[in-house]
Image: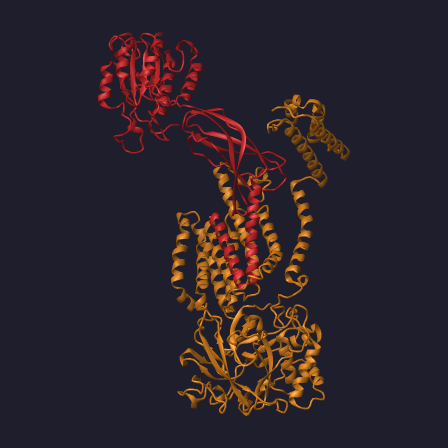
Chain colours: A red, B orange
Amino acid sequence: MNRYASLSLSVASMFFMVMAILVNSPPLFYMVTAVLATLAASTIQAWFAVRALRFERYAPPAVQVGEPVTVEITVWSERRITRPLVTIIDQLPNTLIAKGVLPSLPVAPSFDQPIQTHYTFRPMRRGRFRWSSLRIRGMDALGLINRERTYKTDPIELTVYPAPIPVSVDINTLAGWGSSDLDSGRARGSGLEPRSIREYAPGDPLRYVHWPSSARSGRLMVKEFETGSGVFVNFVIQRTQGTEVGNERASTLEAMAGHSLYLAQQYLKSGAGVAFPVHEDPMGVAAHPEARVREIRDILTDVQADQPDALSDELTAIRKKLTTGSTVVVQIAVQDGRLPEVIVSIPEVHVVCLIYDPNDYLDARPVSSGPPSAADPTYLARLEAAGAEIHVMPKVERLG
Amino acid sequence: MRRLDPSLGILDHALATLACLLAIYSISMSLSNLPMAFVLTGGTLFAATSGYALANLVRKTKLVNYDSYFWAVLGILAVGLVRVLNGILPGDGFPFELLAAGALCWILMIGNLFAWRDQTLLFLSLPCIAIFGLVGTFDTFQPATAMFFLFMITIAVLYARIHHRAMIERAVKAGVDEPALLRRGPWKWMAGPEWALASAMTIILFSFIGAPVLRISLKNVAGRVQVALPQQTSRNTANRAGEERSDVRVGTGPTRLSDQQIFKIRIDRPRYLRLSAFSTYTGSGWKASPVTLPTDSRLFDRRSSELQGSTGPNGGVPLWTRESPPPFEPIRRGEVIAFTFKEASGLFRNIATPGPIVEVKANEDDFSVQPQGWITLDQALEDDERITAYALVPTGQIQDKRAVLAQEIRPIGDLYLSKNKVPARVRDFAYRAVEGADSDYDKADAIKRAIESQVSYNIKAGRTPSGEDPVEYFLFESKEGYCDLFASAMAVMARSVGLPTRYVTGYIINEPTRDEEGFFTVRGQDYHAWCEIYFEDLGWVPFDPTEGAPSIDGGRRGGSGDGLAWFKSDAFKGTVAGVAVLALLAPILVLFRQRSRGGSGTTQRTASEVARLQNAYFRSIERFVGSPKRFSQTTREFVTTVGPRLGAAEPIAAGLVHDFEAALFSQQLPTSEKLSNMAAKVAELRAALGRMKKPRP
């Protein structure tokens, strides 16, 4: 509305000026001078408002996807002048998808003391982000004229880790040893003795619910199993260029990262080994579960769908890193034609395919020219025929 | 001002209403329609009060968001029905040509009813600006400029408050729970509404100087277009000729007449052109008294009954003839002259005439004849339209004529001879003036000369003080005035010695230059008042004592009042007064600000000096090392970080760290000696760094 008021005053001043000249009317000359002077004074005030400022900015170094980030900005006037309020608009990198950006508190910079303001947003995508400029919007005291100026500041870095996305998927981690479901005790509880009982967490299979404890405590309790030290799970994420499908809310790659982090945490908790052999040497990973989770989080933060190689090529490349009897969890969204062949070629490991249907992540209805979905029944049949254990993953509606 | 309540409340509604009232009043008074001004401003006040009550009712409901829709719908309706609405306004409302202004006034009135939110309050100012544009274009209401300035101050405060509220809303969105506390923290140094008010006042002061400069610089290109004037202002009561109860005050103070063209007239020579005549002196002005006469009096005849249905000698509509002159001014010795109007202002309806009109060359349905022979056109003249009339004017010598009313007028002779309300001092002055005069003409001429030698003409003369008789004050106290007082003095003095007189307003032709078709141009500044004395056989004869009176510089006769020396102009006087007020206010403001921030003036000055020195100190080092000090760094940390790069200047810099810490954080303020010492050290540091080569960043 203020913009329209300013526009109207500008138009009025032009009209007054033209009419004043045409009819040589003294009152109109006074009026036009007053209106023009008002606009000029407002412009000068807004211009001064955004000049001669210095800034410092602080943001937490790392957060999870969806966690609120509060950026604190300190502003200091380099001149001893009284200014109208200014608004600071941080120039976040384009790759950083931010939601729920709360406006920063308008401030009046002071010469004598630093004035602090802050704003909050929620990053919706993993990654490491760095930015170094911010925009200042100043208005005059009447709110008629708007002026902006961009300032360079010390660079700021923000690491956005993936958030673990709870998922309920029953992976047979012992199948790599050649034991059947019956032998491995899947029907009896994965063939392993319960180690302890804990509270139910989203994603826990319902069959692990310990009903007597649940009945006693009034809360849903599940059994934790001691896994043998030989259980080892490798995660391989499809990151071929063009295979990420999705939008700002969620994408196949973000879902893969969130799921793999959650599953890795679960396996680590139960004593299993977890590796991302494409990104690290499984032999050199941290032993302590918490340190290991941090390592995995770092790996997943940097995973992007920017590789020229196909998933099957990467799987072939890491074959030597895979220990016999271990499980390889392959997360795939777009069909990789050679993958069934590669799976057949590595009988020493149990391959589990977590399938993400790209159609779940498209804004519009799927089109025939889109990437071929790995959830296509024919393709699934090929993977199954190659010996892979198949799980079609549920759609992730929203991250964070 | 710093503690202005930022919430939308009665102050905001009052400001918006005041802005609307100023605009509405200005346009109404531009049309010289005081009753309409009362009706419209009264209606707007009522609407604003109701609107405020409604706003409080709906404030917490969803309905509040629909105020602009209500306004838009009813506003459009008002525009559609503007002619109907105009009909209910007194004094014929807005002229047809200005119905748009009427529509804007109705829109404002409705707007006041539905201004429930900031946005709609803000929007109210837009029609106001348009209205002021029209008022300024017509230039018929002298206080319009002052009204506009007051309007600007009002909307500046309103805009600032609305903007401030928008900022508070933003702060709340940013998570601030108690906006009131912002003034103590991040908004402590804000230029808020008080700055807006100060800016607006400064701008107005600036406009006083800037506008005349602008106008003078554009003098050569300005004034190419003539704009149709609205009805004349109160000083131009002439346009209400024919209204039985019209009256006029005299000695009302400085005036400024417009130089807008009123009409063009082709006539044999420049003459006095009557618009209205007043018979009764009231002690403060003149009144056209109602006449009580037997109903069969011929004074009521508007035209000769014998001529009805016939065609005049010039092919027009005949009203009277030279042989059968009008009974209200029976000129026995006269001639009929023709005069033609063209390019008349769209709202100029009453024909200014040099004498009683005897024939009008127009369709009989296009005009009406008022009592006493005034002619009113039913419609304004078109751009290319002309109208010709014929008037009976006296001829022959006046010197040997007696100043007595004709037989026909004698029943109302008392009106023109009444000495009621004429001060004794004025009467004595008249008696002394006519001593030795034999004829009535000599008496009239002697009075005229006495006035001319007694007083000066000044269009900027001050108003008559309350309680004083304007003529007496004019003749013996102020001894300056303009046409109204000259004409009044002449009329009452002539009456005092038994001459029948009346006070007449109209136009004189001050610029006797004809265009290629022989037309004179008559402008607003040609508006005039004079005295007329009735002479037997000749009718009413003008006597104008302004003719021979000396003029005050810049206040000459026929001037618009713009020719004053610059140092005597209102603009200059206003500027000087404004600067003087600011000069008085400035120390008070500074004192107030210092007190409101706490600490004495000495403390403030010392702290300010320390801050200045520290800033210079940081600047010198930052410029030398090429990297700024971080906010989070103390002075000591900063110098420790950059110290190795300062080379030989490091000891000076380190020494100053201690000085600054002591000055900023100890309980004792640094003495002036200490401050001088620090300033010297800072200068020494700057010089030392200046001699050194800058390190690589």
Query: Can you give x and y, in whole percent of width and height, for residue A107 in the image?
Result: 55, 38
The answer to whether residue A105 of the structure is visible from this angle is: no
Name the side, left or right, on which B184 lies relative to B360: right
Query: Can you give x and y, in whole percent of width and height, for residue B112 in the image?
Result: 46, 56
Residue A35 sits in which quadrant? Answer: bottom right
Name the side, left or right, on which A193 lies relative to B484: left
Q: Nearer the viewer, residue A212 or A203?
A: A203
Q: Residue at x 44, y 49 (%)?
A: B59
All told, the count of numbered labels is: 0
Quadrant in the picture for the C terminus of chain A: top left
Q: Nearer the viewer, residue B482 or B580?
A: B482
Q: Up-down: is B1 above or below B413?
A: above
Residue furthest front in the image: B516
Q: Nearer the viewer, residue A114 or A335?
A: A335
Q: Up-down: is A251 above or below B183?
A: above
The answer to whether residue B337 of the structure is visible from this angle is: yes
Residue furthest right in the image: B673
Q: Up-down: is A382 above or below B629?
A: above
Q: Residue at x 47, y 90 (%)?
A: B296
Residue B414 sits in which quadrant? Answer: bottom right
Q: Up-down: is B391 above or below A132?
A: below
Query: Can you give x and y, in whole percent of width and height, for residue B19 in the image?
Result: 52, 57
Name the side, left or right, on which A116 lies relative to B643: left
Query: Can you give x and y, in whole percent of width and height, for residue B574 in the image?
Result: 65, 59
